[in-house]
Amino acid sequence: MTPGQRITPCPSVSFIPGSIADMDHKDTTRTPAGSLGALMTPWLMLAPFLLAFLLFFVIPALQTLQLSFTDSGLTETHGYVGLANYVELLQDPSFWDSLLQTAYFALLTVIPLTALGLVMAMLINRLTRFAGLVQAIFFIPNILPIAVMAMIGGWMLHPTFGVVNLIAGTEIAWFNDPDFAMPMVAMATIWWTVGFNVLLFLAALKNIPQDLYEAARLDGASEWGIFRYITWRQLRPVTVMVFGLQLVASLKIFGQTYLLTGGGPFDSTKVVLHYMYETGFVNQNAGYASAIAVVFVLIVLLILVLQSLANRFINRRG
């Protein structure tokens, strides 16, 4: 420092806007009311959903459970009968037949929908041109109302002018044959809903890093090895999710069989929800229909728990 030079004082850090000291000062002056507001904000945002969930799911479920212990009709409430409805249900062959038909439909749809969705997504993912158009073509049936799907399915499988019979050169009344009715309902359902699975698998395929494929090809890996050790391992969580969604959707089937076959022929397509509908709204036995609903929900929950345990076992082995 030369003689006569003025010394400029250094500004204090605490006065610099946006400095660390200033931020620390702001943090230490946070009021309890502000902390409470930050804590309550997520709950306030969830409040509409929780209210709707309470009004439209929890309360009706509890009322259904209560109604299952009564001998109530559709428009009038009778007295408490205890477990009589459940005892009768366990001895009801119509219920077990409808449960068997539901399981048969799930067997015909869950695995094919999952496998077809995966295969079609992998094929579309390889396209370099018109991939968006092909994807839209597969997804368009999924946005159709169920009544429109049933109408198209009825036209395609019509015994006289249906496309299937014209190609096969036959005149088979598919929906009037007990051996073909449920497989044809399953076929129409697969055509209707497979597009949603394609979208889920395509989104998962797009998220796989391409560096993994390039490194595997440089190391001389075969296409099967690339699929087994890269693609399948990356898609396994999505596959489990798609399988679970399709399982739940197939177990709660009602609209397809109701519109395409009416539960026939000879009750060969009468599923559990169809039987519950007839019991409650046609025969006006709301108490017994509520017991069917409770037992069916418990069966579905048990199946989902077993599926979750199986998935955990597979993941540990894999």
Image: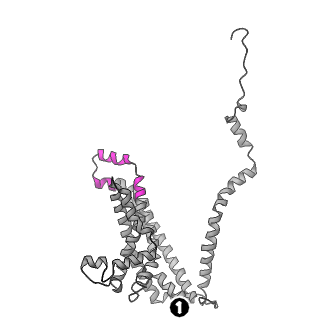
Q: Which residue bears the numbered disc 1?
A: 283
Task: Say left or right for 180 vs 316.
Answer: left
In which quarter of the view is residue 266 placed? Answer: bottom left
For residue 316, say whether it is visible.
no
| Magenta extent | 202-228
Q: How is the image coloured?
A: one colour
Judge from the rendering whether residue 298 lies leftward or rightward of residue 165; answer left or right: right
Residue at (26%, 76%) from the top-left corner? 167
Q: Main secondary structure of the magenta part?
A: helix
Residue lying at the far top in this picture: please name it. Answer: 3
| Amino acid at dot 1 | Asn
- Quadrant where the N terminus lies? top right
Q: Position of residue 182 (x, y in %)?
A: 37, 80
Q: Secondary structure at mark 1?
A: loop
* Vertical position of residue 40 compared to residue 245: above or below: above
**Residue shown at 38% from the left, 66% from the top:** 114
Which quarter of the image is occupied by the C terminus? Answer: bottom left
Could you say where residue 201 lies in the image, as x and y percent from the top left? 40, 60
* Callout 1 crowding tier (Cα within 10 Å): few <14, some 14–19, many ≥20: few
Q: Is residue 93 left or right of residue 286?
A: left
Q: Does residue 239 show up magenta in the picture? A: no
Along the line of sight, the residue nearer the viewer: 133 or 18:
133
User: Does 312 sit above or below residue 19?
Assistant: below
Residue 150 seen in render: yes
* Residue at 37% in and 77% down: 153
Q: Residue drawn at (75%, 43%), measured in percent from left and top?
A: 29
Q: Is residue 206 magenta?
A: yes
Question: Which one is nearer the viewer's eye here, 205 or 239?
Answer: 205
Quadrant of residue 25 in the image?
top right
Above/below status of 116 relative to 175: above
**Residue 130 placement (x, y as % from top left):** 35, 56
The percent position of residue 32, horizontal first and vertical second, equals 75, 50
